[in-house]
Image (cartoon, grey):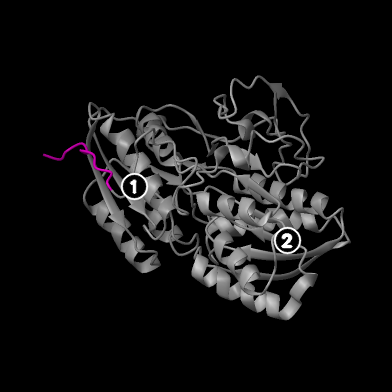
Amino acid sequence: MRRLIPFLRAGVFTLAAALLLPLNSAHADYTGAPRTFLFNPAVQIPFSDTAKFKKKAPYVIGFSNAGLGDSWRVVMQHSLMKAASEHADVIKQLIITNGNMDDAKQAADIQDLISRGVDLLIVSANTQKALDPVVTRAMKQGIPVVMVDRRISSDNFVSFVTGSDAMMGRVWAQWIVEKLHGKGNVIMLAGQAGSSVSADREAAAHQVFSQYPGIKVLDTVYSDWSPVKAKQQMQAMIAKYGHTINAVWCAHGLPVAGSIDAFVAAGFKAGEIPPHTTADLNGPLQLALKYKIPMLEIGYPPAMGRTALDVALKVLDGQPLPKIYEISPQIALTRGDETASVPHPDQYIDQIVDAKGPPDEIIDGGMGPGYNPSTFKIKLPGEK
């Protein structure tokens, strides 16, 4: 049987009643409606009226990606591209730009897409404040915007496709609290300063940690989603705090390998490295099993790229949509590290790890068998 973990939403620390679902196999995935939507304690959830954006097909859609600096972002873009190719009957052209993780470059990209007369924009913002003005401008000009993965600071968009950063941040933190029995020291290894993804996960985690006087956040450091920088940051933290570090809250799987490498380099043996949180990447799971590290994985599926394209088509068809369109994550855990709030994961880490696969492999990419990001090719609508 599979047990749904508690869900925490709407700025209130709320534990939903755990439900039991049938599990057909060790690798079965949850395929129901998004859990974060179903268990949202709010009676009314904001919806966007998209009737004014309804148009006749075929459509020209622009996708402004913050960048392609890591494997997650590559798979997310491929997911969107694959979905577009499957809707060539209603999509005339998909125009993709790469912001190279630079705010000014991405803002210029979006302005160029606007000038090219796209019917709709899909945007994954590098940082939330810097990209707000240009996205707001598009909306004021009547071009609907669907955010994916990273949003802007205002609500000037039609819908935001995400994996619930708040839920991830809170559940990671609650698991750490319970692993430490309410007393211990935590390092927060965050992502990129100014990124909505990292900021929202951090804020949600602090909301949990603040309820436990015995939990102390020693420091918050930023990895810029880089394992190399994460290792440097954690080396500094280990030099400063040593064995008094009882857990590492990581904002994603990207910094985790660097953090673990820092502990190994500092002489920590298997079984001595403190609990870590992670998401998506194969490498941290390999290291967790190798070094006997308690680890909680909450997926942030790059398949949200496909979802963003599906949402975009619903917008252009005039269908009402949730303002925040959250998809369901996968929950995985190292065996023996269950807690009161994470009593039974969807799967265990030894069941989902690709033992011989590359560390940057995305374990929940949703691209189907035979997918290889380095050789992926697909014909997009409008290409000859």
Q: Residues within 10 Å of mark 1 (few under 14, many from 20)?
A: some
Identify the element where label 1 is drawn. Answer: loop
| Quadrant the C terminus occupies | top left
- In front of the other: 143 or 246: 246
| Quadrant the N terminus occupies | top right
* Span colored in magenta: 375-384
Left or right: where does residue 293 sit relative to residue 183? left
Mark 1 residue type = Pro
Q: Which residue is mark 2?
A: 274
Left or right: where does residue 88 sit relative to residue 276? left
Residue 349 location (% of width, % of height): 62, 42
Left or right: where does residue 231 sit relative to residue 89? right
- Name which of mark 1 and mark 2 comes first in the sequence: 2
Identify the element where label 2 is drawn. Answer: loop
- In front of the other: 172 or 55: 172
How many numbered marks are there?
2
Residue 383 location (% of width, % of height): 15, 40
> Which residue is located at x 71 percent, y 55 percent?
205
Q: Toward which corner of the image does residue 237 lie, by quadrant? A: bottom right
> Which residue is located at x 42 percent, y 39 percent?
308
Q: Which residue is mark 1?
A: 373
Q: Toward which corner of the image does residue 298 lie, by quadrant? A: top right
Q: Is residue 88 above or below residue 182?
A: above
Q: Is residue 32 above or below residue 240?
A: above
